[in-house]
Image (cartoon, rainbow, N blue to C red):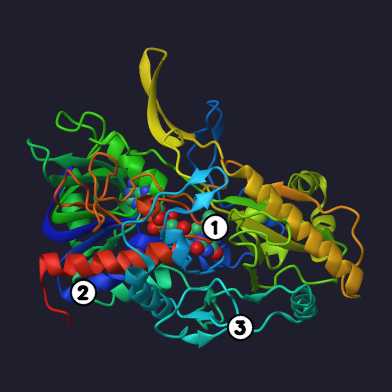
């Protein structure tokens, strides 16, 4: 084991929406910051996918297996790379609605009220939209909360083939608006993510060090359990780019220069005044649970027994309109409809139903590639050409519905003995709730599609709309496993996302969500990282360079 002789002010684990954004916020303080990321930089051609390959090879799944409620293994759709899941996300960055922060009555129950309300989130949403260069239009959606500043860029135009469809949606009396989207305005890498707008900006400061291929495996506390003393990581030796550490590694392991081809890992211990986890809701909880010790027998900072519990991800169903106008399969998603967000007056349904957005070209929609039963079965058997043809004659719509927290939905480690040896499995148990609201949204939208087909010439008559709910391996929208709250008996994190029990341990990924709204979570994760960043700057001091 190598003990790094540098002591850091702050260690951040993970470089996605939470970690990448936080690193960028803290970099100008001049404090010594170490960022540990289990993945590598992702090649551009992997990011700009627009190919049938996404259907057939499970290309964007992580190498490990998690185990579902029945104990069945699956490979989660998780992207371990610099930028995390934002490297493969759709870059749709929406604010949660003002009421989403209150106790909302869903058909299946009442969501917990957030301890911080929209008015206090607003400035951080604005900062996050500026940082991530969000292109949007806050005027036309009646559910859009008030903005103190307009989006930094006006909304992108709808692709030509969607323009008549937008008109048809309006003719239905609905309010289609542009999906707020993060764009770099760079041709080689158009989608805005936490590598481009987070880590790369942070690395412009020489007080920030990034170590890739650095899998954090344990956190060690002091004997009284009140502070994290060391962060343990397995680092792939050939991935170390820091000359000083290479020299140190070579001296200590006697391996000479790091081997080019052979993958060797070395265990490192790093120390810092403050440790921030941003591994994603499942992996941060798993790491804290796995780091249990005498003072924290059920996992770090888990006196409430809430760590790993209340796992949420919104319900998602893709609805396919077949035989639509021919398209190239690669246009970007651009339409958002929130008329059913809080219910359906025409359908006399008073509970929140959720959000509709179009999928964009189906050849680049990774979640669709995992999802629809009809098309995905076809996809397994169709030759590439047939599949491409099918995708190019289809338009996809996503229905998103929020879910309620349930302590029985959770991640935890299960240890079983196999051939006399203990084997650990990460259990990911999620039973969806709020299903009727979601079904109603899906059927309502199919009704709208039918109406549009009857009135518009652009859409051919469909007799059936193939549709499919996102399956278990679609885990990218996870949240809630270390909820934020004022009461240490029922929450893991305080209002600054510091654990109630360990003074220098923070979590800034999507773990902190007390409830899960129908809009996607990434902008709220980014806004929260900026908010927590402000607190950390106050805590550690340091100049703003
Ligand atoms: C295909 C897809 C499309 C999506 N589209 C959208 C969208 O359009 N809009 C939206 O709002 N949301 C979208 N999401 C969800 C969005 O990507 C997540 O909400 C967001 O990235 C969560 O941020 P995070 O910081 O919690 O985790 P992540 O962004 O996943 O970052 C976690 C980071 O931690 C690293 N890590 C994990 N464990 C360790 C460890 N032990 N040691 C070191 N590093 C570790 C990972 O490699 C990763 O870099 C999408 C997700 C997917 C998968």
Q: Nearer the viewer, mark 1 or mark 2?
A: 1
Identify residue for label 2. Answer: 206
Residue at image location 64% in from the left, 74% down from the top? 334
Depth order, front residue of 366/214: 366
Left or right for 105, reference 327: left
- Percent across and percent down for residue 514 are 38, 50
Is 128 situated above or below 513? below
Residue at image location 54% in from the left, 77% down from the top? 190
Residue at image location 39% in from the left, 74% down from the top? 128
CA separation in Å, label 3 and label 1: 23 Å
Quarter location, residue 308: top left
In the rendered picture of this protein, how many numbered marks are placed on residues?
3
- Percent across and percent down for residue 421 are 36, 17
- Residue 156 numbered mark, or none: 3
CA separation in Å, label 3 and label 2: 36 Å
Which tag, 3 or 1, sits closer to the chain's start?
3
Is 4 situated above or below 338? above
- Percent across and percent down for residue 46 are 56, 62
Quarter location, residue 324: bottom right
Left or right for 291, reference 129: left
Q: Give the structural element (helix, strand or loop) at label 1.
A: loop
Q: Give the structural element (helix, strand or loop) at label 3.
A: loop
Q: Ligand 1 shows up in which quadrant of the image?
A: bottom left
Mark 2 vs ligand 1: CB under 8 Å?
A: no
């Amino acid at each position: 084991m190598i003990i790094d002789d540098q002591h850091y002010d702050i260690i951040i684990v993970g470089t996605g929406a939470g970690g990448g954004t936080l690193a960028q916020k803290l970099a100008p303080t001049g404090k010594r910051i170490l960022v540990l990321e289990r993945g590598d930089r992702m090649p551009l051609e992997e990011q700009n996918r627009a190919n049938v390959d996404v259907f057939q090879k499970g290309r964007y799944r992580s190498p490990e297996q998690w185990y579902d409620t029945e104990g069945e293994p699956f490979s989660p759709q998780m992207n371990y790379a610099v930028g995390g899941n934002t490297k493969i996300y759709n870059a749709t960055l929406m604010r949660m609605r003002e009421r989403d922060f209150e106790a909302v009555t869903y058909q299946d129950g009442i969501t917990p009220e957030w301890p911080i309300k929209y008015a206090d989130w607003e400035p951080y949403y604005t900062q996050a939209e500026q940082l991530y260069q969000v292109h949007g239009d806050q005027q036309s959606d009646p559910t859009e909360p008030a903005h103190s500043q307009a989006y930094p860029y006006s909304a992108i135009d709808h692709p030509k083939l969607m323009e008549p469809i937008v008109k048809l949606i309006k003719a239905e009396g609905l309010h289609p608006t542009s999906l707020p989207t993060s764009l770099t305005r760079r041709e080689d890498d158009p989608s805005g993510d936490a590598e481009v707008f987070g880590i790369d900006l942070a690395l412009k400061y020489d007080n920030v060090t990034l170590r890739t291929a650095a899998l954090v495996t344990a956190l060690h506390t002091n004997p009284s359990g009140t502070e994290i003393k060391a962060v343990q990581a397995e680092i792939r030796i050939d991935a170390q780019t820091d000359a000083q550490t290479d020299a140190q590694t070579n001296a200590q392991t006697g391996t000479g220069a790091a081997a080019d081809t052979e993958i060797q890992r070395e265990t490192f211990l790093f120390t810092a005044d403050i440790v921030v986890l941003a591994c994603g809701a499942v992996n941060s909880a798993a790491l804290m649970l796995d780091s249990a010790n005498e003072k924290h027998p059920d996992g770090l900072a888990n006196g409430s027994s809430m760590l790993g519990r209340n796992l949420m991800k919104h319900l998602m169903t893709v609805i396919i309109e077949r035989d639509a106008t021919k398209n190239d399969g690669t246009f970007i998603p651009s339409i958002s409809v929130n008329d059913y967000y809080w219910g359906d007056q025409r359908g006399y349904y008073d509970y929140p139903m959720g959000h509709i957005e179009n999928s964009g070209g189906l050849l680049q929609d990774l979640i669709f590639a995992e999802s629809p039963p009809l098309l995905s079965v076809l996809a397994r058997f169709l030759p590439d050409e047939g599949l491409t043809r099918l995708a190019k004659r289809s338009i996809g719509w996503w229905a998103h519905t929020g879910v309620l927290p349930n302590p029985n939905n959770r991640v935890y480690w299960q240890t079983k003995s196999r051939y006399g040896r203990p084997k650990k499995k990460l259990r990911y148990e999620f039973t969806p709730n709020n299903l009727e609201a979601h079904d109603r949204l899906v059927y309502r939208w199919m009704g709208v599609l039918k109406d549009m087909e009857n009135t518009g010439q652009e859409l051919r008559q469909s007799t059936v709309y193939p549709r499919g709910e996102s399956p278990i391996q679609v885990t990218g929208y996870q949240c809630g496993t270390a909820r934020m709250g004022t009461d240490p008996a029922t929450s893991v994190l305080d209002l600054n996302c510091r654990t109630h029990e360990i003074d220098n341990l923070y979590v800034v990924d999507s773990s902190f969500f007390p409830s899960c709204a129908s809009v996607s979570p990434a902008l709220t994760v980014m806004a929260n990282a900026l908010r927590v960043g402000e607190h950390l700057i106050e805590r550690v001091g340091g100049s703003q360079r």
